[in-house]
Image (spheres, rainbow, N blue to C red):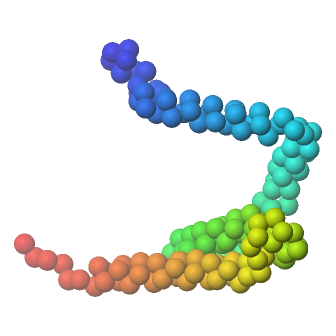
Amino acid sequence: MRPVTRIRAKVGSPLQLLLLACSFALAGYAGVRLLADDWFQVAVWFVGAALLHDLVLLPLYAVADRAVIRSLGAAGRREWALYVRVPAALSGLLLLVWFPLISGRVADHYPSATGLSGDGFLARWLLITAVLFGGSALLLVLRLWLGRATKQRPPTDH
């Protein structure tokens, strides 16, 4: 193997290296800007978020996942858990990001800061959650239907 080929196999193409270098530069710039004002509060927030995730949230959604798998029963149905996991994770992420507006806690401050109404975020989040779970259920039904359709075809004789 030529040295250039070995390097490419380990690192990737020059375009990948350029994109990686640009992403590191952007992350470094964002870090410098973020830590320039109040680095201690940012550090406390990151440590608190990591502890909250690892000590509270991870056990909660691990127990919820086990409950979903246990409720599905037979081993053949365990793969159906993905059709609950994905919409639940996306809905939870949206709730985490937009919680102040969904809960209505900043309904007074939001219009003064943005000029937009702070109402309706709970209804929109519930609608998005329903669409996510409905789409996931539709995909599961289609997958099961297509699986049965292919199994019922008689074998072709050659």
Residue with the most extreme left position: 158
Q: Nearer the viewer, residue 68 or 96?
A: 96
Residue at the far top: name it: 3
Task: Say which quadrant the C terminus sits in.
Answer: bottom left
Label count reads 0
In the figure, 25 relative to 1: above or below? below
Q: Position of residue 99 (x, y in %)?
A: 79, 69
Q: What residue lies at 77% left-to-right and 33% top-to-bottom?
A: 32
Residue at 38% x, 14% y is 3
Q: Position of residue 29 (x, y in %)?
A: 70, 34
Q: Is the residue 48 above or below the residue 116 in the image?
A: above
Question: Residue 120 appears in which quarter of the rendering?
Answer: bottom right
In this image, 57 relative to 5: left or right?
A: right
Q: Quadrant of the N terminus?
A: top left
Location of residue 57 in the rendering, given as x and y in whole percent from the top left corner: 80, 62
Asked whether, in this view, residue 50 is left or right of residue 25, the answer is right
Residue 88 placement: quadrant? bottom right
Q: Position of 101 compared to 132: left or right?
A: right
Determine which quarter of the picture holds residue 117: bottom right
Q: Nearer the viewer, residue 100 or 94?
A: 100
Observer-nearest of 14 and 115: 115
Residue found 61% across the figure and 72% down from its top:
87
The answer to whether residue 44 is above or below residue 29 is below
| Residue beneath the point at 85% across and 61% down | 56
Nearest the eye: 2 or 121: 121
**Can see residue 60?**
no
In this image, 154 relative to 106: left or right?
left
Q: Is residue 88 visible?
A: yes
- Residue 61 location, x and y as percent? 75, 66
